[in-house]
Amino acid sequence: MTEHAEIQREVHSKTVLGFWVYVMTDCVLFATLFATYAVLHGNTFGGPSAKELFSASFALGETLILLTSSFTCGLAMLAAYRAKKEQMLAWFGITFLLGCAFLGMELHEFSDFVKEGNSWQRSGFLSSFFTLVGTHGVHITCGLIWMAVMMIQVGIRGIKPVNFKRLACLSLFWHFLDVVWILIFTIVYLMGVVNG
Amino acid sequence: MDNDISKQERWQPSLKSYIVGFILSIVLTLAAYFLVVEHMLTGLALVASIAFLAVLQIVVQLLFFLHLGKDENAYWDLHVFFFMLSVVLVLVFGSIWIMYHLNYSMKI
């Protein structure tokens, strides 16, 4: 019981605040990439425009998968708060698989574009598109590696205060990536399909 | 400050907040998608409404998933958040404004 109380105190620690500050600076990084995309999205240099390239239904599929993974990540944290190790591992396992599915869809889209000759070298629009969405993809990849490491750690050592602190940071990171994706879905895909 | 914490009720996320956040997010995502695909609105009205839906969804996720302003670090969490927001707004709207005018001046 004392260990459980300690776990609860740990979540409010300075580490989580420090991680929150990092997440906020990451928002600034994404803001620069969004600004670049906003400025360059019309510069297609005779190549395909956003309207010709993007499929709204494919992007909707990616969005729903990532949204669900954010929800299951929340459920995993609830299980961690109650120190239920098996439940927590199961929810993080589902989150991990959903994250892999999302990443697979994104890479599939990228490889399709490149195969059709529409890589980042084609136009200013595509350079900024690949940089923005690719940076999000790199973040997702890091999040997945982190999640795998945490699952192994918790699997071996159980939910200890030091693990719990890391889990709290990981869930912040994962929810944050979901928020960034909502902006990508709206600004890049939906507005791209509308305006071309 | 630390002595006062014992008087407050310790905060914990609830299952309800995640379920409400998840349902609202799904509804807002589908609403934006169908507005675009079914051509329910056109032009500026369409762009403005999907932008509004996105902002709404971000607020939902900040409150129900990230629990902004709920835990004991809320004061500093919010300070950093609003500082980030001001930097981001200057950066994005400043870039678009400057580049649009440059583009405008270069024409003809």
Image (spheres, grey):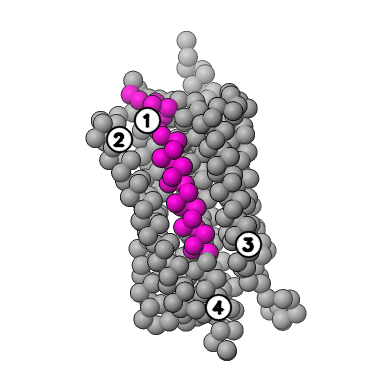
Residue that numbered label 1 is attached to: A53
Q: Is label 4 on the same chain as label 3?
A: no
Residue on which disc 2 sits: A113
Mark 1–mark 3 Cα distance, whole angstroms, equals 37 Å
Q: CA distance from mark 4 to mark 2?
A: 45 Å
Q: Amino acid at mark 1?
A: Leu
Labels 4 and 2 positioned on one and the same chain: yes
Q: Which residue is mark 3?
A: B17
Name the one closer to the observer, B81 or A96: A96
Number of residues whose C-alpha sits closer than 10 Å to that of mark 4, classed few (under 14), some (14–19) or many (20 or more)? some
Give the amino acid type for the residue marked by disc 4 in the picture: Arg
Q: Amino acid at mark 2?
A: Phe
The magenta stretch is A47-74
What percent of the width, then of the height, locates residue B96?
Answer: 53, 31
The secondary element bearing badge 2 is classed as helix
Q: CA distance from mark 1 to mark 2?
A: 8 Å
The residue that mark 4 highlights is A82
Query: What residue do we see at 53% from left, 50% from top?
Result: A179
CA–CA distance between discs 2 and 3? 39 Å
Question: Tag 1's secondary structure?
Answer: helix
Query: Picture quarter containing residue A56?
Result: top left
Residue A129 falls left or right of residue A11: left
Question: Label 1 neighbourhood size at 10 Å, few (<14), some (14-19), many (20+)?
Answer: some
